[in-house]
Structures are given as C-alpha cells and as structure tokens.
Amino acid sequence: MQILVLGSAAGGGFPQWNCNCVNCRRARAGDPAASPRTQSSLAVSADGERWLLLNASPDLRQQILANPPLHPRRGNRHSPIAGVVLSNGDVDHVAGLLTLREYQTLSVYASDRVHGVLRDNSVFNVLNPAVVARRTLPLDSAVEIGGFDGAPIGLRVTAFEVPGKVALYMENEKAGPGFGTQSGDTIGLEIRAANGRHFFYLPACAALTPELGARLRDAPLAFFDGTLWQDDEMVSAGVGAKTGRRMGHMSIAGEDGSLAQLAVLGVRRRIYVHINNTNPILLAGSPERLQVEAAGWEVAYDGMEIRL
Amino acid sequence: MQILVLGSAAGGGFPQWNCNCVNCRRARAGDPAASPRTQSSLAVSADGERWLLLNASPDLRQQILANPPLHPRRGNRHSPIAGVVLSNGDVDHVAGLLTLREYQTLSVYASDRVHGVLRDNSVFNVLNPAVVARRTLPLDSAVEIGGFDGAPIGLRVTAFEVPGKVALYMENEKAGPGFGTQSGDTIGLEIRAANGRHFFYLPACAALTPELGARLRDAPLAFFDGTLWQDDEMVSAGVGAKTGRRMGHMSIAGEDGSLAQLAVLGVRRRIYVHINNTNPILLAGSPERLQVEAAGWEVAYDGMEIRL
C-alpha cells in the first residue's frame, strides 16, 4: 500500500491567506524552517495504478500537479484517481470536488448527511452523474471501494465515529447548517489493503475515548489530528476566539493531549496531520517540534510518501 | 492603476488535472516553453494598498501566495483584498470565494442572478454576512467600488453584456442551472480609476458585435477571451465534443476570430487571457504564438504586472 500526503495543513493552509502570525510570516518569507503546506488530504493506492483520495481539499488542483502518481497516463483524458472518501462536509474537505470536473469517471463515498449537503449545493452538479457515482459510506462497516464502474481497487474503508464538536445549541450561525454537531459528523477512517496492511486517518478528534484507544492499539500507522499545540493557541496568537475543544480538536500538549494520551497505545508509526498555521510544530527545530519528534511522532509535510 | 494577472488559463487551468494533450504533457514535464498557468483572474488597485479581484478562481489561495501585493501587511489578521467582482457564476470564477473565509472583511459584487446562485449554495455561507457585504452589480452603470465598509477604493466598474452562449433549450443538463443562457449572463467589465485610466476585461465573448466594437475602440488596454485558437480545437484534440461557439467563446484565428476582428479597433494594448489548455498560443515559439505576437497581441501569464 502506498500513501501520499497531498496536504498536511488544517483549513486555510500554511500560510493562511489573511494570517500575519509569526509562523505565516516566516512561511511567506521563504524561511526553510517554515515549509508551506496545503490543506489536509491523503492519497492511497494498493497497486500504484488506482488511487483513492481521503478528502478533497480546496488545493486539490495544485496537489495533483505536485504528485506525479496522480497525473494522467494514457489517452487524451485520464486520471489515476478512482475515488474520493469524504470524512465530513467541511469546506476544506469537499471544495476540491469542484476541481474533479471535466467529465472524468469517479466515485465519491460519504455519509448520507454529507451527500445531502452536496446535493443541496448545486455547484457540485459539475460532477456529472453520468460519470460520477455517489455512494453511501456507512459507519462501522468495511466498504470495498470501487471506481465509477464498481470494480474494486483493492482498498476497504471503515468509517467510525470519533468525539467531535460541541452540541448544536452551542454553535453560532457561522457554522452554517449545523455541521459537526450531530452524531457521526466527526469520523475517523481505517484503510485496509487486501494483504491486511492497514492504517488510520483521523484529521479531527476531540478526545481519546477508551473505545478509540482500543481501536488504535498496536496499529501499524495512524495519521492523527495535529491541529493545535495547545487549546487556547489561536486565542493567545490573537487570531481567533475559539479554543481547540470548541472546534472539535484535542491539543497535542498537556495531560489530555494526544502526545500523552496516545503514548501508551503502541501505535508503531504516529504522524501529525491537519496542522493549523499557528501550531509551533510547523517550525523545524522549534522546542515543540523537537518534543514531538523525541516522543516518536512525525510531522507530516506535503509530498511525504509512505509504503506499508 | 496597477494590474496583476493572477491566473491566465481557462477553467481547469494549465495543465488540467485529467488532460493528457500535448500541451498538458509538456507543461507537466517542466518544458520551459509550456509554463503552467492557474485559472483566470485579475487583481487591480488604484493605490497599491487596496485591491479588487476580478473573479475568484479555484486557485485563489495559490494565487494570493504567489503575489506579495496581496499578502497581509499588519496586525494579526489582514488582507489588502478589499473586494471581488464576479463576471458570472461559473465554478472557475466563484469557487475561490471559499478561500476568502476566516472572518475577513470584504465586498462581493455580482449580478442579482449570480448572487442568487451564491445564496442557493450554502457552502458560500462561510462568507459571514457580518464581515462580507454582497452588493448588486447592475448592467451599464458605473459602480464606485467600496470595501466592506463602503469606503471607495478608487475604482469604478461598469458591467456590460457581451454575446455569450446559445439558448437554454440547446443546453444539456451538465450545464446545471442554465447558467450562461440568459441575457446578461456573459458580461464584460470596464475598470476605471479616478485619474481616468481604464481598461476592459472580457474573459468570455462569443462574437464581436458593432456595439462592442464601438465600446472598445481606441481603448488603452483590453484583456480578451483567448480560450481557443480555433472553433473545433477541443474536438480535434480528442478531449471534448463542444465547439468554442457552443461554449460562448469566439476563436482567435480565422475571419471571425478576435485577431482579425479586433485588428481595426485601435486598442493600444491587447492581451489574451482565459486560455484553454489545448490552445497552441500557450507554447512559446509556436507558429500560433508568433502569429498573435506579430499582430501586436500579448499572451498573458501568471504574475504579469501592468501599470496604466
């Protein structure tokens, strides 16, 4: 199984268009310790021929261009991208679908609720139903992923609920249609090849419950929510009023943080993804980066390749 | 007045994600004669401080990053982008609005019909009405552009109808909600600074009518529809069934083409924009590129800067 990190930053990317924080300034200035990162997405393949996208970020056109395995290979029109799995309906996970127009066959897997959002937004009609199959991704059930024609591409995906955002009544209107506030709105994915190799992808997770811990125990690889270093990071950076908990993300640091909480699970390879522009682990050589590396974690970067 | 070409390619960009035509292959291979181009958009400023975007392409995040005048300058959150004018509701002209989230003040000017599309697509609710003003852009009337607070930024924009796509009954369902098929769906823009300097932006135009000719006569600068070299270009390249005329674009070559038709209008500077990936003028040194250059035209490229 091959895995490509297409984008490793949280929503907005790194640097973020309107953010002038220290990290973003350094990234814009070309500081080699502050490599730019596009928005969170992975590509996975069992055979190197047909690829599955985990989420479709707004940067998808740029991400495809930067990753030769995703370039067309034959004929006049072609793409190795056979399908897309959406972990939720956030703009930073679905906007890239708008790039996948141009009458190319494709399958899109998502919860019924996310499909409802796509249906209610007519811009996604650029994905012509004649060539794009929209399929339901149920919870807690391994789904054999197929391309548009249904032919299996050698990957099975299991979606499972993880702790997410606070309840609807605490949301403000900015959140739009109440996304991320119902059961099943925040999910993790297990991706498994026919040979049994597998990994977990959890770009958002608000807390490590005992159930989740049991699922992850002794896993060969997990990409985990690395949005924030600490819960009040955006508040202290002066760029926002929301805490990580409020946004459905557990922090890296602290007793309740992922660094401490995952330490005892025996996950053999642990990689932070979905990293917010304010997070100090983005800076090579920062004390926080050194701390996560010393604890055996890796910090994902765009173009990172993994073979399982 | 300063003008930045943020993106010079038509929808899909160059190379296009799933296109394997000769041009796209050369662009992907890094051929210096085939420079990659992002999707069509301009940025304009009267004072170098506050910028107006003409359309918001899906590549906007990448385009902002590539153009330092659009970077934040002060405080924790800031953007020199004061407003956006949308020439239509096509995905390649509106998807970039999704990048302009993150609670940044902004104004968006479009026809009522385009605003209706934005309203009907809840994903655009990421543009919080508390900080983003949506204003009507009427036809044939100079509008003083203001930022969110309404304070003028020194630019007046006049939208005017230009010949566009064929009638609704000839559209297929792929076209979605019938866009580009009603009067006023294809518009050109005249942008004028307080000092009288002005230019035209016509990324789509199906024919040069006498009215349009009169409007453009002796203009100092026009960015014009350079989508296709010839009408059946996508058909001959084997990448599509639609002619240019069918898509609302007049070709460059031929008796009815823009090269011949605009030759007599005395437009002092003529620049092709919105160039499709199949168009041979994308290749430096190609006979077609040499022909348009010999006729006094320029071929826009990403990052092109113009002062008027």
Image: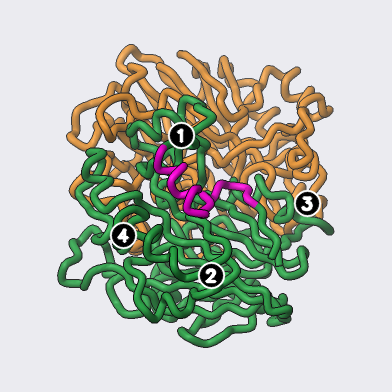
Chain colours: A green, B orange
Q: CA distance from mark 4 to mark 2?
A: 37 Å
**Are labels 4 and 2 assigned to the same chain?**
no
Give, as a single range, the part of the protein colored magenta. A287-304
Q: Position of residue B83 (x, y in %)?
A: 32, 36
Which of the two labelled residues, at mark 1 and mark 3, occupies the earlier sequence position?
3
Q: Residue furthest bottom?
A: A141
Chain at numbered mark 1: B
Q: How far apart are the two marked residues, 1 and 3, measured between alpha carbons?
A: 28 Å
Three-letter code for the amino acid on which mark 1 is drawn = Ile
In this orientation, which residue lies closer to the viewer: A228 or A167?
A228
The chain containing the residue under callout 4 comes to B
Q: Secondary structure at mark 1?
A: helix
Q: Which residue lies under the disc numbered 3?
A: B20
**Both labels 1 and 2 in a single chain:** no
Q: Nearer the viewer, mark 4 or mark 2?
A: 2
- Callout 3: residue from which chain? B
Going 26% across and 53% down the picture, which residue do you hit?
A231
Q: Are marks 2 and 3 in contact (CB under 8 Å)?
A: no
Q: Chain of mark 2?
A: A
Secondary structure at badge 2 equals: strand
Identify the residue under disc 4. B119
Front disc: 1 or 3: 1
Q: Is residue A50 above or below residue B260?
A: below
Three-letter code for the amino acid on which mark 2 is drawn: Phe
CA gap between label 4 and label 3 equals: 36 Å
Crowding at mark 1 (Cα within 10 Å: few <14, some 14-19, many 20+):
many
The quarter in which the N terminus of chain B is drawn is top left
Q: Is residue B82 above or below residue A171?
A: above
Q: Which residue is mark 1?
A: B64
Tell me how far mark 1 sits from mark 4, CA to CA. Answer: 25 Å
Identify which amino acid the numbered label 3 is placed on: Asn
